Image (cartoon, rainbow, N blue to C red):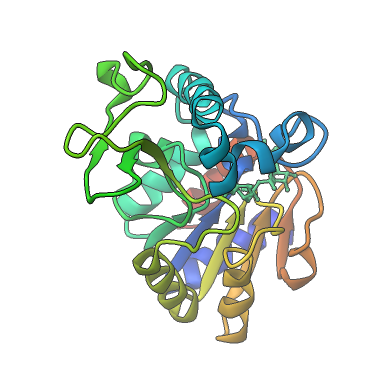
Amino acid sequence: MSELERAAELILDAETVVALTGAGASADSGIPTFRGKDGLWNRYDPRELATPEAFAKDPEKVWKWYLWRRKKIAEAEPNDAHRILARMEEEGLLEAVITQNVDGLHQRAGSERVIELHGNIWRDECIDCDYERMNDPERGEGLEYDELPPRCPECGELLRPGVVWFGEPLPPDALVEAEELARGCDVMLVIGTSGEVRPAADLPVIARQHGARLIEINPSETQLSHHMHVCIRERAAPAMRRLWEEIRAMR
Ligand code: OAD
């Protein structure tokens, strides 16, 4: 039996399937990953762009980088990995997507239950008061500001992008929900993550400790590969297309 057939069989036999996605799930949409040869952290220093200290030192520089990323994301379209996960949820084959991605592409593809562990790049949050605003890129929002860094319309303090930076805790509700899903699922589909960033990378381990079978979709071996029951060594979009065909043939 091929790895693809084994994956399809595990999914069809499972009661609860959960997906965990990372930057590799959006790579086929043309959005760069963080690690590896073409990764963002190869070209940029995360300490200068993605930490609270970097923002305190030079908020304009940090905002410019996030606006560049927002533009790239606005120009991108969800790929078949996003679309098939949405379809699987619609057909009752997938409980939820837990994502480390901040691009919102799962939601744009139609996924309903998306748990964002690292926030959402389209949200603006005040660093001081409770003000926050979700920008809609389809309406051209959040792509440029009259002044940089932008300021809170309520209190005048700085706005920041609604993502989790290095050294910051994850949104507690999202983490609790993700851990519950990890403990309760029978299959976790781990797509396009290097497994180098915790606590997201602990989720497959938690799932396995609670009896789940793990499927990895990733062209490369990762920190998590040795925990996997099935590895599909292919890019996310073609792998999900073939997996979906296999599932439909077996149903
Ligand atoms: P990484 O950049 O660390 O890993 C991307 C993974 O995707 C690698 O394992 C690649 O082999 C794989 N990959 C590349 N192209 C792919 C494709 N077309 N299809 C499938 N897989 C592919 O990204 P993450 O694991 O998501 O955090 O990184 C985790 C966190 O580190 C990010 O959320 C971000 C970053 O710093 C924050 O910003 C807080």
- Image coords of residue 60 (percent x, y): 50, 25
Nearest to the observer: residue 53 or residue 83 = 53
Residue in view at x 73 percent, y 58 percent: 231
Residue in view at x 61 percent, y 30 percent: 28
Q: Is residue 42 left or right of residue 23?
A: right
Asked if one can make out residue 242 in the rendered structure from this viewpoint, the answer is no
- Image coords of residue 196 (percent x, y): 72, 58
Please give the count of numbered marks on the rendered protein: 0
Work out whether 204 lies above or below 128: below
Residue 225 sits in quarter: bottom right
Nearest to the observer: residue 146 or residue 199 = 146
Q: Is residue 118 left or right of residue 92?
A: right
Q: Quadrant of the C terminus?
A: bottom left
Residue in view at x 57 percent, y 70 percent: 203
Work out whether 163 lies above or below 3: above
Q: Quadrant of the N terminus?
A: bottom right
Q: Is residue 79 left or right of residue 87?
A: right
Q: Quadrant of ligand 1?
A: top right
Residue 46 sits in quarter: top right
Asked if one can make out residue 8 in the rendered structure from this viewpoint, the answer is yes
- Image coords of residue 236 (percent x, y): 62, 41
- Image coords of residue 48 (percent x, y): 66, 37
Work out whether 39 lies above or below 239: above
Residue in view at x 32 percent, y 59 percent: 92
